[in-house]
């Protein structure tokens, strides 16, 4: 009979066993019953009680076992002699007999014997050893029992063990209330279902994994796209910031070149775009700022004066009356305070250095009373010995002077002039050969103008001036006018008897030239230049008008340059080489305050400025940009080529019009001299080249309708006054290029008929009268160009009409059409290789029309069409492409400056352009020199690095001084930092480049 179901929360089977005998088998049997035919959605097939696995900690153990027995449907007895003797097993059987029937007890024989006696209808107890006596007579028929005695020798039993599984199946079938076959079918079904579910789960997991991978990939793509967009946005922001910085730098370039340079440096640091690089180059060329620094950070100056050479500055301040600051200004960016000179407490109103800077005269004046009258003894004069600048000595102190106004030293420093009394005051001259004990030369002489005094450069003329207007009555009517502004010229050839020889009205201040008796007088908004060679009859040379009141002025040592301070805080520089026609003004920045001290350096190259805020600036008198210094004119058309001698003192210019070669002495590029021309070439002179010492000139010629004739003539140019013909080399066709080695007696040439094949040749010219041919390559066949892949076809060789022949600086490397050659042995020249470039188009650029080596031989610059390319010349030979740029028109010729960072090009459109080159960065335009209607036929740098010759085919050659551009092109950021001394501060960076992380620029 099938037992009734146990109450909820009960057990399907209760295992009763001896721990000693079956402590290993009972757990395996429990696991087997729970796992056999287990549905996939349940934790176990049957709930089986086993005391060690199912009992919780409880002090009343039997009560707990009773509850478990009462809640179990089947009793599974693990029969063995040990369990038969166990009192616990006996009690459990007794309880089961009381509450259940014999058909709910299943027996598992684990040891001993069980024998059933059919006649008795009970066990044969005399032979049964595995069952306890409590079971006597209880069974009405032979019960189900399973023999598992064999398991004693089988450790690690599980359902994967077939025999054990069979035995467990018999027990489980009884507990489940089904036949063994049905149970096996259910197990198969559950297993199949589990397999299906497992497969479905695996499939689902696979699908989920694929989906997850797809989603992860999509997420990664989105992340990458977001990163890309973020990078693009960041790049766009950086580009926008660079553009804004550069635009602001250009806007303030003239008014505030210091900030302009700092902004350009910041733009270059953020992203070195072409615009940023070109902007910095342009600013460096256009500004004349040479340095800037702050001397007085806590006070403003009331007056300042430079020494004659601009290396020493004396300053006064209203906060410290009578105290004079002395500054070493040799380094404008870092002015150094030397000491403070202490006077008598009165305000200092005049500061005057001796010409050699060894002495300083200071005049202090307490001013006038309310009635406009000077109190007796209201002023003082002191002399300071500055020979030891760190420890100046007061050598003279005149106190209680009557209204002293100013003092000045003569150019030789032996005479001092002192004016007092202001308008209608006095003039005195003193011998200060011994500064501590001046000797009076004159008594107080009446001086109509006595606020200012100055000596002419020869010391023979003295000028006193006054900017004071006085009246005898407060009515200020013309009839009460006592004194108007003006200046007086004094003849002091005899310093003991000065004579006032001329007076001119209108005076606010003035300054003498140190080179000539020229006086610059400022009045109101006008500055007038006067010639005082005849002081009794001053002659006006010219005048310059301004928009505002004028401040101090200064003249350069050579008298050719004038710097003027204006009340609107500006300063202007003029070239007054022709005083009647001053040059256009060059603005020297917009300053925080009015500039009240100006001084040119002793060499006249810079001018130093100091304003009331304590800011010092130094400016170049000449621009850093290239400037045209001369134009050479030839009576010919179709100029073709030019060449400087190695020392830069000779220039040869060739013409295809009549075959003439002009020689010029360029020892002084600003004043070149035309020498005797060379004649006797063929109809067209195509190229010229000097040898290493400039004593031999080679001229390449061509003749005939198709250049079917050619020759090379050699000339002795050691004396330009008498050049001599040396010899001639006849060629089979016109010569397009010629080059003399800079270090050996080797000549290389190349050419071709207009429609014929090219050739190249080498000659030994140790004896220029009898050249000997070393090698002739006819036809000349450049090596096929490299390809980007091994399988691609070689690039075609395109020989241009213009044919280069250029030696490297050591004379062993030669650039010929489209190929570089090792000519260590001119009789066996060897082609050099070209490294394949990652830029496919770079491989085409190797076909070039023009070439030039840097002075160190490490770089080669080539041109083809409008492309300009830069190559690295490898030590082992051959070329590696670095960078390129494109001109607006086809290039005619190129050359590279000896510094290696400046390239000159000329094009068909008539423009000569200078390019800054360096490393792998593309060349950028640094300056456009010539913009003419004629084609630029040639460009050549002199080897002394200062001059560029631009040859126009119309018959003229322009000579340009390249200025500071080579140094700027080599390191623009370094030059800019040398001027500014610092980049933007963090606060300034936040203002001009918000959102961009701060980066130091200097």
Image (cartoon, helix red, strand yellow):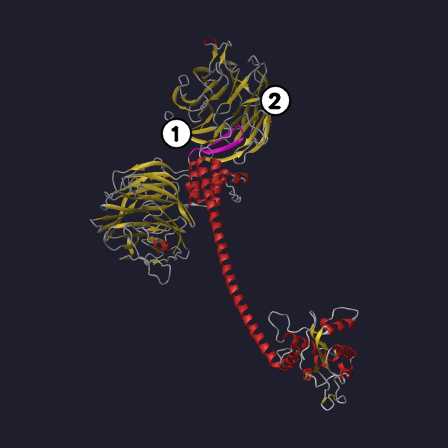
Residue 596 on image: x %, y %: 50, 26
**Residue at the image point whose x is 50% and y is 54% from the top:** 223
Give the main secondary structure of the magenta stretch: strand
Labelled disc at residue 40: none
Decide: is 637 above or below 48. Answer: above
Q: Is residue 39 left or right of residue 106?
A: left
Q: Is residue 640 left or right of residue 217?
A: left
Residue 8 on image: x %, y %: 69, 69
* Secondary structure state at the residue bearing disc 1: loop
Residue 254 on image: x %, y %: 44, 33
Residue 787 visible in this rendered orientation of the protein: yes
Callout 2 crowding tier (Cα within 10 Å): few <14, some 14–19, many ≥20:
some
**Residue at the image point whose x is 56% and y is 15% from the top:** 368
Q: Quadrant of the N terminus?
A: bottom right
Q: Is residue 695 left or right of residue 972?
A: left
Q: Residue furthest bottom?
A: 119
Decide: is 308 above or below 473. Answer: below
313 within the magenta span: no
* Secondary structure state at the residue bearing disc 2: loop
Decide: is 759 above or below 5. Answer: above
* Front position among marks 1 and 2: 1
Residue 643 visible in this rendered orientation of the protein: no
Q: Which residue is mark 1?
A: 584
Which residues make up the magenta segment? 605-622
Q: Nearer the viewer, residue 79 or 158?
A: 79
Callout 1 crowding tier (Cα within 10 Å): few <14, some 14–19, many ≥20:
few
Residue 649 position by quadrant:
top left
Question: Which of disc 2 and disc 1 is earlier in sequence?
Answer: 2
Q: Nearer the viewer, residue 799 or 639?
A: 799
Q: Nearer the viewer, residue 378 or 973?
A: 973
Labelled disc at residue 345: 2
Q: CA distance from mark 1 to mark 2?
A: 44 Å
């Amino acid at each position: 009979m099938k037992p009734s179901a146990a109450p909820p929360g009960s057990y399907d089977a209760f295992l009763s066993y001896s721990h000693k005998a079956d402590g290993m088998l009972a757990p395996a049997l429990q696991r087997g019953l729970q796992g056999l035919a287990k549905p996939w959605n349940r934790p176990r097939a049957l709930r089986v009680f086993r005391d060690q696995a199912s009992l919780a900690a409880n002090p009343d153990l039997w009560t707990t076992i009773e509850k478990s027995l009462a809640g179990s449907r089947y009793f599974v007895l693990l029969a063995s002699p040990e369990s038969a003797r166990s009192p616990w097993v006996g009690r459990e059987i007794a309880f089961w007999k009381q509450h259940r029937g014999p058909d709910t007890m299943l027996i598992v024989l684990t040891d001993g014997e069980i024998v059933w006696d059919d006649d008795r209808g009970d066990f044969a107890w005399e032979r049964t050893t595995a069952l306890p006596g409590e079971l006597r007579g209880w069974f009405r028929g032979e019960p189900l029992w399973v023999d598992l005695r064999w398991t004693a020798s089988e450790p690690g039993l599980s359902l994967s063990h077939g025999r054990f599984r069979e035995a467990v199946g018999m027990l489980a079938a009884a507990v489940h209330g089904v036949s063994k076959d049905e149970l096996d079918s259910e197990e198969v079904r559950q297993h199949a279902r589990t397999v299906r579910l497992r497969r479905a789960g695996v499939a689902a997991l696979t699908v989920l994994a694929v989906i997850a991978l797809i989603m992860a990939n999509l997420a990664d793509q989105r992340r990458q796209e977001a990163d890309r967009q973020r990078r693009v946005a960041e790049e766009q922001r950086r580009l926008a910031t660079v553009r804004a910085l550069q635009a602001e730098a250009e806007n303030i370039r003239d008014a505030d070149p210091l900030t302009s340079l700092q902004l350009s440096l910041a733009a270059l640091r953020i992203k070195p775009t072409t615009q940023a690089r070109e902007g910095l180059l342009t600013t460096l060329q256009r500004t004349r700022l040479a340095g800037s620094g702050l001397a007085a950070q806590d006070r403003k100056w009331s007056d300042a004066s430079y020494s004659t050479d601009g290396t020493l500055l004396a300053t006064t301040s209203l906060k410290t009356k009578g105290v004079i600051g002395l500054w070493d200004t040799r380094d404008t960016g870092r002015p150094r305070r030397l000491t403070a000179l202490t006077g008598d407490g009165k305000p200092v109103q005049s500061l005057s250095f001796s010409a050699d800077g060894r002495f300083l005269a200071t005049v202090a004046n307490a001013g006038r009373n309310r009635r406009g009258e000077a109190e007796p003894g209201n002023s003082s004069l002191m002399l300071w010995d500055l020979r030891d600048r760190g420890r100046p000595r007061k050598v003279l102190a005149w106190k209680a002077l009557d209204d002293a106004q100013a003092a000045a030293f003569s150019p030789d420093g032996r005479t001092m002039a002192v004016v007092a009394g202001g308008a209608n005051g006095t003039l005195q001259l003193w011998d200060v050969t011994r500064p501590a004990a001046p000797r009076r030369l004159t008594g107080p002489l009446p001086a109509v103008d006595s606020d200012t005094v100055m000596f002419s450069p020869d010391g023979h003329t003295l000028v006193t001036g006054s900017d004071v207007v006085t009246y005898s009555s407060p009515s200020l009517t013309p009839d009460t006018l006592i004194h108007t502004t003006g200046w007086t010229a004094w003849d002091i050839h005899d310093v003991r008897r000065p004579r006032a020889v001329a007076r001119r009205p209108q005076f606010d201040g003035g300054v003498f030239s140190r080179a000539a008796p020229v006086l610059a007088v400022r009045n109101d908004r006008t500055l007038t230049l006067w010639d005082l060679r005849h002081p009794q009859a001053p002659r006006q040379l010219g005048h310059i008008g301004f928009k505002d009141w004028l401040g101090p002025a200064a003249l350069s040592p050579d008298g050719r340059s004038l710097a003027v301070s204006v009340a609107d805080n500006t300063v202007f520089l003029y070239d007054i080489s022709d005083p009647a026609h001053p040059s256009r003004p060059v603005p020297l920045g917009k300053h925080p305050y009015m500039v009240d001290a100006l001084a040119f350096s002793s060499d006249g190259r810079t001018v130093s400025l100091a304003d009331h805020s304590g800011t010092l600036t130094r400016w170049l008198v000449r621009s850093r940009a290239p400037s045209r210094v001369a134009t050479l004119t030839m009576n010919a058309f179709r100029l073709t080529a030019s060449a400087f001698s190695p020392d830069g003192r000779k220039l040869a210019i060739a013409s295809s019009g009549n075959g003439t070669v002009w020689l010029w002495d360029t020892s002084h590029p600003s004043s070149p001299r035309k020498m005797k021309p060379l004649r006797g070439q063929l109809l067209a002179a195509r190229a010229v080249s000097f040898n290493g010492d400039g004593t031999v000139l080679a001229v390449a010629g061509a003749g005939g309708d198709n250049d079917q004739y050619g020759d090379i003539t050699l000339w002795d140019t050691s004396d330009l006054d008498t050049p001599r013909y040396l010899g001639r080399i006849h060629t089979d066709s016109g010569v397009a290029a010629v080059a003399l080695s800079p270090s050996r007696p080797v000549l290389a040439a190349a050419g071709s008929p207009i429609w014929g094949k090219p050739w190249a040749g080498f000659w030994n010219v140790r004896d220029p009268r009898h050249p000997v041919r070393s090698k002739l390559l006819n036809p000349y066949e450049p090596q096929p160009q490299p390809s980007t892949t091994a399988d691609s076809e070689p690039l075609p060789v395109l020989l241009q009409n213009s044919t280069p022949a250029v030696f490297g600086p050591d004379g062993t490397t030669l650039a010929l059409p489209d190929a570089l050659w090792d000519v260590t042995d001119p009789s066996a020249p060897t082609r050099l290789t070209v490294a394949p470039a990652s830029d496919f188009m770079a491989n085409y650029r190797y076909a070039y029309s023009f070439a030039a080596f840097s002075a160190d031989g490490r770089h080669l610059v080539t041109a083809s069409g409008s492309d300009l390319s830069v190559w690295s010349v490898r030590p082992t030979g051959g070329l590696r492409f670095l960078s390129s740029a494109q001109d607006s028109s086809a290039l005619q010729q190129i050359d590279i400056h000896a510094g290696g960072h400046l390239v000159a090009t000329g094009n068909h459109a008539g423009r000569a352009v200078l390019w800054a080159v360096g490393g792998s960065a593309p060349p950028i335009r640094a300056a456009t020199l010539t913009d003419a209607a004629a084609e630029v036929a040639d460009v050549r740098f002199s080897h002394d690095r200062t001059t560029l010759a631009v040859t126009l085919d119309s018959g003229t050659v322009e000579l340009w001084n390249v200025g500071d551009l080579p140094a700027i092109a080599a390191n623009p950021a370094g030059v800019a930092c040398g001027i500014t001394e610092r980049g933007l501060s963090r606060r300034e960076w936040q203002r001009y480049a918000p959102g961009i992380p701060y980066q130091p620029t200097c």
